Amino acid sequence: MCGIIAYSGEQKASPILFEGLKRLEYRGYDSAGIVTLDQNSELELKKDIGKVRDIHERLNLLDLEGTIGIAHTRWATHGGVTQRNAHPHVSNSAEIAVIHNGIVENYKELKAMLVSEGFHFESETDTEVIPNLIEHWMKKGLSLVEAVARTLQSLEGNFAIVVLHRASGTVIGSKNGSPLVLGIGKANSEIFIASDIPAFLDRTKDVVYLYDGDMVVVENHPKEKKRTWRIFDFRSDLEAQEELPRPVQSVSWDLEHAQLGEFDHFLVKEITEQVDTIQKAAAQDRELIENITREIKNAKGVFLVASGTSFHACLSSSYLFAKLASFHINTVLASEFSAYENFLKPETLVIAVSQSGETIDVLDAVKTAKKKNCQVVSIVNVMGSSLTQVADMTVLLNAGPEVSVLSTKTYTATLAVLTLLAYSLAGRYDEGLRKLKFLWNIVYNLTAQNTRKKIQQLADKIRNEEHIFVLGRGPLYATALEAALKIKEVSYIHAEAFAAGELKHGPIAMIKQNTICIVFVSTDTEKTILSNAMEVKSRGGYLVGIGPKPLESFDFFMKVPESDDLNPILQIIPIQILAYQLAVVLGHDPDKPRNLAKSVTVR
Ligand code: F6R
């Protein structure tokens, strides 16, 4: 949570940082700010509450001068949403500016120490101790690099930070548990440090993935018009700092993935992209999938671990593993995984699934697994993310950057990969792949204009509802959970999912005249779910059916062709569209729902 971008180059920094901030806003959008180093070697700072565009309208962020700067968009943790709490934060003598993503868990002790040394504080944030600690160590005679390293050594908790030093123009970035990546312009003409690649994808595709403990020092040499970068491990002895070799890699993501193009919002763009992304996810290296299949077969106990939408994909697939391969997979919420620690053995396989690869609950679960010497496979969309760095094997979703806070294309991409794995485990890899390839046409129709028009009628009808209930059976129960999550995240209408058979065990008390109830139907669950639907209908409920054929009891019907084991990949799509349309019709920002952020790096 929180987006970070730094620039050191030959161009004016503020427009580049402003564009980068707009692309990072999905990580947090309570407040934002930029600090640059102007021609007089002074720090120029502008920050305020609100979204980046609104702040720019009020403050004109683009008139900040200088070719070096750092910028931040915030998701508040410590301290309310105020101008003072917005980043960047500057040290008492205005020598050091810092942007930060994460939490300094021991900031109270550090602050007390600094106050006793005469430092004063402007904000309520944990972050403000960082620039002042660096200043404190420099006053004690340490060099900038040593002072930053010493400061980082004293921080408890996960973080990614960038430091800007006024006197030298040196920019230092470091990470420990939160994402940070280096972008390298041609011949070092410009260097970026950012939370995520899309922040600078319009300027370079050459990146260096940073690992926990890495501290990258970007030095500016104005006379030679050049800059250099070196990476150290801040945890090592200050006297024995050795440069770490880190390769420059080229990313395959295209800029158009991170741009809106003809679309009004990323959410609808990414829903539409599923025509391609499901195919790309299915086009895996067969050897890799077969290796993982072998690991699954040989393991004593397999866990699928994830959070939120990724968890729903895991839950859905666990039915498929059982059905196709008679294989039991334990599906556990990452935040609850530690309760299973006693079942973990070196022969246990943990498959950790995360779009971002940065979700702290998932990373914690992997830590628990590693402590017990388990093998870890990750299924991830973001290459180079923290999860890929700790896993023994990684399957990439290849869905391109997902900018909207809501996961859509990565949900179906995850389902595609897990479906392939389940078919592979059943010894039917080719059949699985063929079936996934066959989805292309159906997804195209489901995301087409006429389908969207039809769903618009439903959005108009239910926009003022307070409650929506969603029912499914088997893997479509997981679809129901995901549908309810999509609706509530962005429309703020309360939506709740039930395994259809559970309705009569309590939730039916909530059904009254015109209560909206969405029902996912497949050919094999039709009979049973129909009786659950009738229980709703006979109490006056309004039934929205999604499935292969209209049932008499449905008041509204969305046809999704029967696709057997692949139904969950298809049936969620109309609800993704519905959630988007509800947001638009209710005047909410579909890409930045309130209180949410794309990668959840706090516990
Ligand atoms: C919902 C959503 C979240 C994420 C969850 C896990 O639309 O996006 O529920 O699925 O925060 O994120 P990842 O998959 O990045 O670990």
Image (cartoon, rainbow, N blue to C red):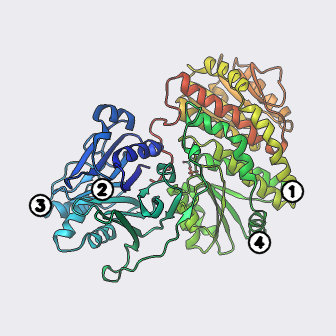
| In the image, farthest residue toward the front | 224
Q: Nearer the viewer, mark 4 or mark 2?
A: 2
Between the residue at mark 1 and the residue at mark 3, the CA separation in whole angstroms equals 69 Å
Residue under circle 4? 298
Among the two numbered marks 4 and 1 on one chain, the one whose residue lies closer to the N terminus: 4
- Determine whether the beta carbon of the residue marked 4 sits less than 8 angstroms from the nearest atom of ligand 1: no
Q: Residue at x 52, y 67 (%)?
A: 248
Q: Secondary structure at mark 4?
A: helix
Label 3 crowd bin: few (<14), some (14–19), many (20+), radius 10 Å: few
CB contact under 8 Å: marks 3 and 4: no
Q: Which residue is mark 3?
A: 118
Which picture quadrant has residue 585?
top right
How far apart are labels 2 and 3 at the CA level?
20 Å
Name the secondary structure under disc 2: strand
Please name the residue that numbered disc 2 is placed on.
Answer: 98
Please report the residue visible at 51 percent of the width from the left and 46 percent of the height from the top: 598
The answer to whether the beta carbon of the residue marked 1 is less than 8 Å from any atom of ligand 1 is no
The answer for how far apart the CA atoms under marks 1 and 2 are is 52 Å
Question: Label 4 neighbourhood size at 10 Å, few (<14), some (14-19), many (20+)?
Answer: few
Q: Position of residue 325 (x, y in %)?
A: 84, 58
Residue type at mark 3? Gly
As drawn, is 10 to the left or to the right of 304?
left
